[in-house]
Amino acid sequence: MGKHKGDQGEYEFTRAASDELKEAERAYGVKFHVELEPTEQLGVWALCVAAVKPAGDEGLVYASSWSGTWPNSMSITYAAFLYAACHRCVRMVEAWHAAKEQESAPKA
């Protein structure tokens, strides 16, 4: 018989989501904002994960954002959905950071 994780699996997803955001904040100098709001559809929640970077005199720069609703057509738990949203947003921040570095690199 297989090992049942119970709530431990949910904790592992939420912990991994938190770790991923904190590591990206340190690596890329951004701050993540996570918002959860009910939608007009009963029982459905909208999640938005956004990364902002202070831009000196310019105010804030939105580095990336990802949003989605849960439950949705995919059969995953909320904790897995939260982790996937955070993971996707961090990958977008990595791409944004790489593009910024490429823009500021000396031209040959």
Image (cartoon, grey):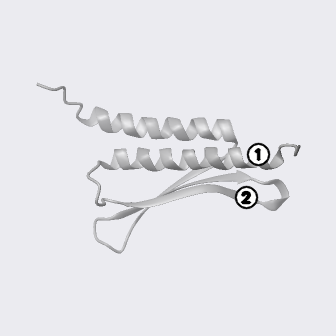
Residue furthest to the left in view is 1
Residue 80 image position (x, y, % from top left): 35, 45
Q: Residues within 10 Å of mark 2 (few under 14, many from 20)?
A: few
Q: Earlier in the sequence, mark 1 or mark 2?
A: 2
Mark 2: which amino acid? Leu
Residue 38 image position (x, y, % from top left): 38, 66
Mark 1: which amino acid? Gln
Depth check: give the residue in front, 70 or 42. 70
* Foreground: disc 1 or disc 2: 1
Q: Would you say 55 lies left or right of 30 here?
A: right
Q: Which residue is label 1 attached to? A: 102
Q: Would you say 4 lies left or right of 11 here?
A: left
Q: Which residue is label 2 attached to? A: 60
Per the image, label 1 sits on a secondary structure element best described as: helix
Q: Would you say 79 lies left or right of 88 here?
A: left
Residue 17 image position (x, y, % from top left): 46, 40
Using the image, determine if residue 48 lies above or below residue 14: below
Question: In percent of the image, x 28 and y 60: which residue is there?
Answer: 73
Question: In percent of the image, x 69 and y 44: which residue is there?
Answer: 98
Using the image, determine if residue 88 lies above or below residue 11: below
Residue 26 image position (x, y, % from top left): 66, 36
Numbered disc total: 2
Per the image, label 2 sits on a secondary structure element best described as: strand
